[in-house]
Amino acid sequence: MSDSAQRCAGAFGSFRGGLAERLVEKLLFICALSSILIVFFIIAFILKEGIPVLALGPDFFFGMTWKPGQGQFGVVPTVLSTFIVGIGALGIAAVIGIPAAIYLAEFAPEWLRALIKPSVEMLVGIPSIVLGFFGLMVLVVFIRDNIGGWGECILAGWVILAVMTLPHVISISEDALRAVPRTYKEASLGLGATPLQTIRKILVPNARSGILASLILGMGNAIGETMAVLMVIGNPNIPWIPSSVLEPVRVLTSTIVIEISYVVWGSTHQHALFALGVILFSIVAVLNAITTALIRKGIRTGCR
Amino acid sequence: MSKIETIGLSVYYGDGTVCGLKAVNITIEANKITALIGPSGCGKTTFLRALNRMNELKGAQTKGKVLIDGIDIYNGKVDVIQLRKRIGMVFQQPNPFPMSIYDNVAYGPRIHGQRNENLGTIVEESLKKAALWDEVKDRLDENALGFSGGQQQRLCIARALAVNPEIILFDEPCSALDPVSTARIEELLTELKQEYTIVIVTHNMQQAARVSDCTAFFLMGELIEYGKTSQIFERPKDKRTEDYITGRFG
Ligand SMILES: Nc1ncnc2c1ncn2[C@@H]1O[C@H](COP(=O)(O)OP(=O)(O)OP(=O)(O)O)[C@@H](O)[C@H]1O
Ligand SMILES: [Mg+2]
C-alpha cells in the first residue's frame, strides 16, 4: 500500500515537474557556473597582466625601491606599509571590539543591547568615501593640530580603518561568545567562579576561534579597503618604509588607484600595478581562507 | 541539626508574573539523601537552584528565607561565590568543560586559589570518590568530551567534589544515562552521603525509593508532602501524593 502510494507520488511528481523542472534546474546551473567563470576570468586576467612584472622575481618581491620612471618596481615598502596600516587598525579594533563584544554578550541589559547592536552594525553601512571625507576633515585636522606632523598619516589610517573593522569584530565575536553553551557557564558559576573568571577561563577560550576569525576577517577588509584609506594616509610620491606613525605612507590599494590614472597603456608600469593587484588579492584570499577554516573549526568544537 | 531550612520560600519568574515556587517550608537533614519528586514544571529545579542562588542568573526573584547552617543566604551579606563553593551542583545533562579530565577536576580548586602542587592529589582523590579514577587514571590528559555519558556525569561529580562542598545538589543526574551508568551513580550517592548532604531531583520513582532517606513531593510550585521515603511511598498522607506515586497522573 505505502509502496504503491510512493510510486504514485513519484509518477505524479515527474509528470508535473518534467520539462519545466529540468529547465529551471539547467538555468540555475548556468547562473552558478557563470559566477564561477567570472571569478576565474578575473583572476586569470589579473595574473596574465601581472606576470611580466611578477617574473622579475626578487627585484619585484624583495626590491626596496619603487620608481616606475626608472623601471624600478620593488614592492617591499608598499607591502610593509600595507601590513603596518592593517595590523595597527586591527589592534585598535581588537582592543575596543573584544571587550565591547564581551560586554554585549554578558553584561548589557536587553534594552541597551537592542540599542548598541544596530548602531554598531550601522557603521558598516557608512560608505567608505564618506568616512574618508570625515577622516580628512576632522581626524586629519585634529592630528595635525594636536599631535603633530601633516595630519595625513598612518595614525589617521589606523583610526579610520579601525572604525570600519570594529562592527565586524564586535558582531562576530559577540556571536561566538553567545554560542558557547550555557551549561559551561552554569557549571563554572556553580563551582563558585566569579563572572569574570568564567569569562576568562570558559567563555573566551571557547569562543576563541570565532574571535580570531573576526580579527582576521577584519584584517582582510582593512587591507583591501581603498577609498577611506586613500584620503587620510597622505600617499607620498614614492612608497617608503615609515619610521613614525605620524608619517604619510602608501599602501597597495592607494598605489594602484593613484598610479593607474597616469600609467602608460601596455607599459611595464601597468603590468607592475597588476602585479600589485595579484599580491593584494593573494593576501586577502589567504586571510579569508583562514577565517573560513577558523569558523568551521569553531562550529565543530562549539557543538557536541 | 538541620543543614538546610527554607521558610516561606517563593520564586517568581519574568517580572514576578510567573510563580515557580509557592511558600515552601522544608527542613533538610545533614548526611541524608533527600529526593524531590513531582510532575514536570512543578518547581523541583527552581527549588534546587534557590539553594545555591542560581535562579538569579535567569533574573528570577526570590522571597522568603533559605537557612544553611542557620544563616539566611538571601540576607545580602552572604558572599554568593563562597556559597556556591560550599554547595556543589550536578546538572541533568553531563556538562564537562571541553578540556582534559585533569583540568576539569582542577578547575574549581584553581579558581579558588589552590596551589599547583596540591592539585594532583585533589584531582586523584576527587576522581576516586566519584568512582572514576580506575577508568581514567591513564587518560587524564584526554579531552573530557571523548568519554561516555556516564563517565562524563561522574566526572562532573568529581569536579563538584574537588572544591570540597558540604552540600551537593543533583538535578536529574541520571536522566541522560543508561541503566548500568545509573546504577553506578546511585551506588555512588549512597557512599557520598557519609560526607555530604545530598538533594536530588528525580523523575524515577524507583530511584527515589532506592536511594533517598527523605522524599518531598511538589505539585504546581507547592510542597505537598514531605517525610521519610518509606512513609511517602508506603503510606502517603495526601491523596495527590498517592495518585502521583501510583502513576495515576503526572
Ligand atoms: N527561566 C524561566 N522563566 C520563566 N518561567 C520559568 C523559568 N524556569 C522555570 N519556569 C517556570 O517555573 C515553573 C517550575 O519550573 P521548574 O523548571 O522548576 O520545573 P521542574 O519541576 O524542574 O520541571 P522538570 O521536571 O520538567 O525539570 C514552571 O512552570 C516553569 O514554566
Ligand atoms: Mg527540572
Image (cartoon, coloured by chain):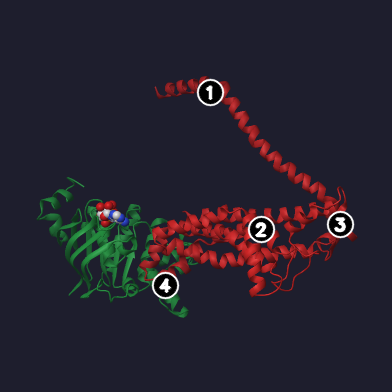
Chain colours: A red, B green
**Which chain does the residue under circle 3 lie in?**
A
Q: Are marks 2 and 4 in contact (CB under 8 Å)?
A: no
Judge left or right: residue B73 versus residue A147.
left
Secondary structure category for the residue under label 4: helix
Please tell me how crowded label 1 is: few (under 14), some (14-19), or many (20+) other residues with Cα within 10 Å.
Answer: few
- Residue wearing tag 3: A56
Residue B35 found in image quarter: bottom left
Q: CA distance from mark 4 to mark 1?
A: 66 Å
Q: Disc count in the image? A: 4
Q: Residue furthest right?
A: A70
Residue B217 found in image quarter: bottom left
The mark that comes first in sequence, 2 or 1, is 1
Residue in front for this viewpoint, A226 or B24: A226
Callouts 2 and 1 on one subunit: yes
**Which chain does the residue under circle 4 lie in?**
B
Please give the name of the residue rendered at 22% of the width and 68% of the height, measured from the top-left corner.
B32
Secondary structure category for the residue under label 1: helix
Q: Residue B168 location, x and y as percent?
A: 30, 67
Residue B63 found in image quarter: bottom left
- Residue wearing tag 1: A17
- Residue wearing tag 4: B124
Q: CA distance from mark 2 to mark 1?
A: 51 Å
Please tell me how crowded label 4 is: few (under 14), some (14-19), or many (20+) other residues with Cα within 10 Å.
Answer: many
Q: CA distance from mark 2 to mark 3?
A: 31 Å
Question: Mark 4 CB in 8 Å range of ligand 2?
Answer: no
Q: Residue A83 location, x and y as percent?
A: 70, 64
Please give the name of the residue rendered at 77% of the width and 69% of the height, measured from the top-left corner.
A241
Q: CA distance from mark 4 to mark 3?
A: 64 Å
Q: Nearer the viewer, mark 4 or mark 1?
A: 1
